[in-house]
Image (cartoon, rainbow, N blue to C red):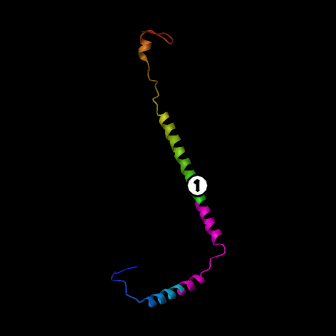
Amino acid sequence: MNDTSPDRTEQDPTEQDRTEQALREALGTLAGGVQAAPDAYRTARGDWLRRERRRRLVLAVLIAVVFTLATLIGLWVLNQTPSHPSVIFSNAVASGGGPGSWAP
Protein backbone atom coordinates (compact mmCIF):
# COMPACT_ATOMS: atom_id res chain seq x y z
CA MET A 1 0.00 0.00 0.00
CA ASN A 2 1.35 3.42 -0.88
CA ASP A 3 0.83 5.59 2.14
CA THR A 4 2.72 8.83 1.76
CA SER A 5 1.28 10.66 4.75
CA PRO A 6 3.87 12.63 6.77
CA ASP A 7 3.26 10.70 9.99
CA ARG A 8 4.24 7.41 8.39
CA THR A 9 7.92 6.56 8.81
CA GLU A 10 9.83 4.71 6.16
CA GLN A 11 10.97 1.24 7.25
CA ASP A 12 12.71 -1.42 5.32
CA PRO A 13 10.79 -4.71 4.85
CA THR A 14 12.89 -6.69 7.32
CA GLU A 15 12.32 -4.15 10.09
CA GLN A 16 8.57 -4.22 9.40
CA ASP A 17 8.59 -8.01 9.56
CA ARG A 18 10.41 -7.93 12.89
CA THR A 19 7.97 -5.34 14.28
CA GLU A 20 4.97 -7.37 13.13
CA GLN A 21 6.47 -10.54 14.60
CA ALA A 22 7.14 -8.83 17.94
CA LEU A 23 3.61 -7.45 18.05
CA ARG A 24 2.19 -10.83 17.15
CA GLU A 25 4.13 -12.50 19.97
CA ALA A 26 3.19 -9.81 22.50
CA LEU A 27 -0.50 -10.04 21.61
CA GLY A 28 -0.36 -13.84 21.63
CA THR A 29 1.17 -13.81 25.11
CA LEU A 30 -1.42 -11.32 26.31
CA ALA A 31 -4.30 -13.33 24.80
CA GLY A 32 -2.94 -16.55 26.27
CA GLY A 33 -3.10 -15.12 29.76
CA VAL A 34 -6.76 -14.19 29.48
CA GLN A 35 -9.08 -16.82 30.92
CA ALA A 36 -12.84 -16.61 30.77
CA ALA A 37 -14.78 -17.17 33.95
CA PRO A 38 -16.38 -20.61 33.95
CA ASP A 39 -19.88 -19.23 34.47
CA ALA A 40 -19.53 -16.11 32.28
CA TYR A 41 -22.18 -17.24 29.79
CA ARG A 42 -24.65 -18.16 32.51
CA THR A 43 -24.10 -14.83 34.27
CA ALA A 44 -24.47 -12.82 31.05
CA ARG A 45 -27.62 -14.75 30.09
CA GLY A 46 -29.10 -14.24 33.56
CA ASP A 47 -28.43 -10.50 33.33
CA TRP A 48 -30.05 -10.37 29.90
CA LEU A 49 -33.13 -12.30 31.08
CA ARG A 50 -33.46 -10.04 34.12
CA ARG A 51 -33.36 -6.92 31.93
CA GLU A 52 -35.89 -8.48 29.54
CA ARG A 53 -38.26 -9.27 32.43
CA ARG A 54 -37.87 -5.73 33.75
CA ARG A 55 -38.66 -4.28 30.30
CA ARG A 56 -41.78 -6.41 30.01
CA LEU A 57 -42.93 -5.52 33.53
CA VAL A 58 -42.41 -1.80 32.90
CA LEU A 59 -44.34 -2.08 29.63
CA ALA A 60 -47.22 -3.94 31.32
CA VAL A 61 -47.40 -1.35 34.11
CA LEU A 62 -47.30 1.48 31.57
CA ILE A 63 -50.13 -0.08 29.56
CA ALA A 64 -52.20 -0.58 32.73
CA VAL A 65 -51.64 3.04 33.80
CA VAL A 66 -52.59 4.42 30.38
CA PHE A 67 -55.69 2.22 30.21
CA THR A 68 -56.75 3.22 33.73
CA LEU A 69 -56.22 6.91 33.03
CA ALA A 70 -58.18 6.70 29.77
CA THR A 71 -61.05 4.93 31.54
CA LEU A 72 -61.11 7.45 34.40
CA ILE A 73 -61.00 10.41 32.02
CA GLY A 74 -63.80 8.90 29.96
CA LEU A 75 -65.95 8.34 33.03
CA TRP A 76 -65.26 11.87 34.26
CA VAL A 77 -66.24 13.34 30.88
CA LEU A 78 -69.43 11.28 30.79
CA ASN A 79 -70.26 12.42 34.32
CA GLN A 80 -70.00 16.09 33.33
CA THR A 81 -73.40 16.08 31.59
CA PRO A 82 -75.86 18.80 32.65
CA SER A 83 -78.27 17.86 35.42
CA HIS A 84 -81.41 19.09 33.60
CA PRO A 85 -82.48 17.18 30.50
CA SER A 86 -82.19 19.12 27.29
CA VAL A 87 -85.10 19.17 24.87
CA ILE A 88 -84.46 17.33 21.67
CA PHE A 89 -86.95 17.42 18.83
CA SER A 90 -89.04 20.15 20.45
CA ASN A 91 -90.69 20.84 17.07
CA ALA A 92 -92.41 17.41 16.98
CA VAL A 93 -94.05 17.95 20.36
CA ALA A 94 -95.20 21.49 19.51
CA SER A 95 -96.89 20.42 16.26
CA GLY A 96 -99.23 18.11 18.11
CA GLY A 97 -97.72 14.90 16.95
CA GLY A 98 -96.80 12.43 19.59
CA PRO A 99 -94.71 9.36 19.34
CA GLY A 100 -95.64 7.32 16.33
CA SER A 101 -97.46 10.11 14.52
CA TRP A 102 -96.13 11.69 11.43
CA ALA A 103 -96.77 15.30 10.57
CA PRO A 104 -95.70 16.59 7.17
Q: Residue at x 52, y 46 (%)?
A: 66
Where in the figure is residue 82, as x and y percent of width and height?
45, 29
Which residue, as the protein is rendered here, is positioned at the far right?
A: 38
Task: State which region is magenta.
Answer: 25-51
Task: Identify the amino acid type marked 1.
Answer: Arg
- Seen from the viewer's position, the closer of residues 30 and 58 is 30
Q: Residue at x 56, y 55 (%)?
A: 58
The reply to whether residue 48 is in sight is: yes
Quarter location, residue 15: bottom left
> What residue did someone put label 1 on?
56
The vertical placement of 52 against 96, above or below, is below
Residue in the picture at 49% in, 38% down: 76
User: In the orientation shown, which residue stands out farthest toward the left?
Assistant: 6
Q: Circle 1 — which element?
A: helix
Question: How far from the left and from the top, in percent, is residue 84?
Answer: 46, 25
Name the main secondary structure of what is drawn in magenta: helix
Q: Using the image as rendered, state which of residue 92 and residue 82 is in the foreground.
A: 92
For label 1, the crowd category at 10 Å Cα-Cα, with few meaning under 14, some 14 to 19 and many 20 or more, is few
Q: Nearer the viewer, residue 10 or 71?
A: 10
**Residue 33 visible within the image:** no
36 vs 93, nearest the viewer = 36
Report the residue at 48% width, 88% height from top: 17
**Quarter of the N terminus within the rendering:** bottom left
